[in-house]
Every structure is written in structure tokens, then in C-alpha cells.
Image (cartoon, helix red, strand yellow):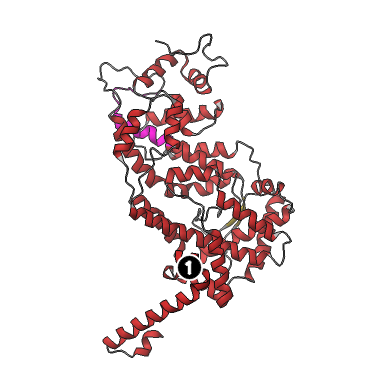
Amino acid sequence: MSIDRPAGSTPGGDDVPAWEQMLRQMFGPDTDEALRQLRAQGMDPAAMAAASGLPDDPAMLGQVLEQIQRLLAASGSGPVNWDVAHDVARQAAVAEGDPVVAAPRARQVTEAFSVAELWLDAVTDLPPSGGPVRALSRSEWVEQTLPAWRILTEPVAASLSTALAGALAQTLPEFEADDAPAIPGLGFPAAGADRSQLIRQLGSAVFGMQVGQAAGTLSREVFGLTDIGLPLVKEPSTALVPSNVDSFAEGLDAPVDEVRLFLALREAALARLFTHVGWLRGHLLGSVAAYARGITIDLESLEDAVHAIDPTDPAALQGALSSGVFAPHTTPEQQAVLDRLETSLALVEGWVDEVSAAAALPHLPHAVALREMIRRRRAAGGPAEQTFATLVGLELRPRRLREAAALWAQIALDGGTTARDSVWDHPDLLPTTEDLDDPAGYSARRTATQDAQSEIDRALAEILGEDPGSATD
């Protein structure tokens, strides 16, 4: 039995899709039978290629299909196939070139951070991070940050994979072990494979491709390790990706040296924050974990969507994925977590924005323009960030950056830089959405809260028979 194709087309011809050409190279004369068996089980390579978000590139697709071939021959895969994610991320990172960082460019980065640290010393009480300074290629950025994406995406992928497997398993036909032949070239018998496990393995591969494509694409956009406001490495460090810095500077009036210095200021400021505010990393990642623990899937909607989608129609599957059909359902409890996380990200980004601007203004002629450019860039986000928003259910860009920067500026105006930076001493001191709405009233609200707490401490001291004065020391 052969597959349907337009009249006049020939296997391997110019009008044959890249994915089919690659399958024919892999399977040879068994290709038609392989495709027939895959479609008989409700699967279609074209739909998988479209859903993965990969470009129609035969070389890249061939490497991905090889990964899937190994995946299907294995068992016990997790919710995300990280081998696939790693390989796809590396491929996407080098898609537009990824030159090795030469020694002179690495020295430029080191010098920029040396100057940035000196300027930051004058505007913040937080000391330098003390970690290594790195000039990274795009591939090196992927290697450094992929473990963090695992923390962010795997809990969500696990919940979605389980729900999707349950829904799809009901739509696939049953096969008897004696009736179903092996799928040529894939290395396992279709009848001998557990359908739900097979679906999980395929889902694992698809998630891996999507995470890898997003991370690889992001590696072509980021300037360093701190662009998204979340800690992407565990150890204290500062880094820039010189090729991305240069590309960004090409469209600006400011000279590239000035752009590099400004970006180094932002990177070094956030590195100081994550290094010396010990609870901050756990606070942010804990919010992500709390969100993931509360994930629920609208199984009825998911099953309806699965039954309504023609598995042989790539456009339908791609449309379903992009429209959020398989997105987790956000509960009121999760929405509260998301609101807290959004406020925290805005406060982090706002502090970096305010501190780096204060450090740059006396020295960089284009500081104001560069600050505004970065603000707009962070507010808009990019394709890779939008992909992660779909995968994780979280938007990694702060919606209230300007309000947060205005709040930090007001705190510094009222009490100086020490008062501003001391807010990070404890998570209970973090400003709230009310403070973002009304920065001018922050000091009065903070004083009222402190007075109320002092009254409670004195009352407790009297009940316990202690000196009331000692409770407020």
C-alpha cells in the first residue's frame, strides 16, 4: 500500500516535503509501509514536524528523527526528552552562525564588567557577586542554562503528558499482537508496545523539541545570563554573549562599547542581587514549583479537542497547540501564585533598571535611550519567551517594570540607597501590588506596618512578663 501524493510527484522529488524525503533516506523501500503503520495508529510525521515548531530543514529534521527513532526504541523516558532538547537547542543556537569567542572579544567583556562593577559600587550597598566573568558563544549559553529550563518546564510537562496520554489512548485502535507487524526502521513492534507508554514517549520527544527550539532561539536573543529575571545558573557569575551584543548595537546610534558597558551594568547588578540576597532564588523558583504543583487539566475539553482533531492534518494539530487547547487550567490558587511571581519579577527587574541607570547616567551619553530600549524589549518579549509561556504556563517578562522602577526610585529618594537595598533583607519586606500602584505612599504604609508590629511585640512582652522595651530592640 502506498501513500497518497499529488499526481506527477515522485518519491524524493522536489515536491515531496522535507520530512518525507528524510524518511525515505532512512527507511528506503520500507518507507510506505512505515508511514502506513504510523497513520494506522493515529500518528503522522508531518503533524509531529509541524507541532514541534522546527523549520522545514532536512538536515535538522533528520537529526531530530534520529533522536525520535532512538527514543521509540527505548523505555522509561521522562516527561521531557532532554537528549532531544539538548541537541535541538544546540542546532537552533548555531542556525544563524555561532563563532567562537576570540581572546580580544573576551577581553572586551572582562574590561566592561570591571568598569561596571566600579560604577555599581557608587550606587548600591550590595557588593559584587565575586563569580567568574565569561564571554559566551550561543552554544555555551545553551549548555550553561539548559539545567534551569529543566526545573522550569519538567513539572508542567509531566502533568500535561499524563493527561494527553490518557486522552489519546482512547482514540487509537487496539492491535492484537499476532496481527500488527513491526513498524519498519523504528526498531520495535507496534503490537508489543504499550499504547500509553508510546504516547508518553512521543510526547516526551515533542516537549523536548519544543523546549530545545525555544532555548536555542533564546540563545540568539539574550545578552547574558539574567535577561529573563530568573536565575539561570546556580553559582555566582556574570556573562555576556558578544555576538548578540554586537547584533543589538548595529541598529542603535550608540557605539558598541557603550552598549556593551550598559548591558554589563545590568548583568552585574542582577548578579549582585541573586548572590547576596540569599532567599531570592528559592523564592522565585519556589513560586514556579507552587504553580506546577497545582496544575490541573480540563480533561473534558482535552478529550473533546483530541477527538475533533484529524491526526493526519498538520495544520489542525498546529492550530490546536498554538490556541492553547493543551494548556493547563489555571485555578484561583494558581492565579494568586502567578500574581505574586509577577510582582516579584517586576521588583527584581525594576531594581536592576533603577540601579543600572543610576550607575550609567554620569558616564554614558546614551544611557537614557539605552534604558528605554531595554524596557521596551523586555515588555514586548520575543518568540522564544512566548514559546516558554506556552510550555510552562508562565510569562517570563515583567508587566509592571516601569512602576517597580519608580517605586525603587521613590524609596531611594525618601531614605537613600541603604533604605532601598535593605528592602531585600527579608521576603516579608517586599513591596506589594499596592505599593506598585502608589509608590509615593510606600513609606507611610511601611511605617504604619512597623508601628503595628511594635504594638503587637509590646503586648506580647507584657503578657509574658518581659520588659516591653526589650521586644522592640
Q: Is residue 203 left or right of residue 96?
A: left
> In this view of the protein, can residue 117 be seen by the observer?
no
The answer to whether residue 194 is magenta is yes
Where does the image place residue 176, in percent across and percent down from the top left?
25, 20
Q: Which residue is mark 1?
A: 435
Asked where in the image residue 115 lies, by quadrant, the reply is: bottom right
Q: Is residue 261 left or right of residue 183?
A: right
Which span is picked out in magenta? 186-206
Vertical comparison of 369 with 54: above or below:
below
> In this view of the protein, can residue 153 be seen by the observer?
yes
Where does the image place residue 394, in percent across and percent down from the top left?
44, 49
Q: Which residue is painted at 62% across and 49% down in the image?
A: 241
**In the image, what residue type sits under mark 1?**
Asp
Viewer-side residue, 172 vs 304: 304
Number of dots carrying numbers: 1
Viewer-side residue, 382 vs 268: 382
Where does the image place residue 242, in percent across and percent down from the top left?
66, 49
Asked where in the image residue 183 lies, by quadrant, the reply is: top left
The answer to whether residue 112 is magenta is no
Q: Which residue is painted at 47% across and 61% down in the image?
A: 344
Viewer-side residue, 397 vs 118: 397
Vertical comparison of 311 with 391: above or below:
above
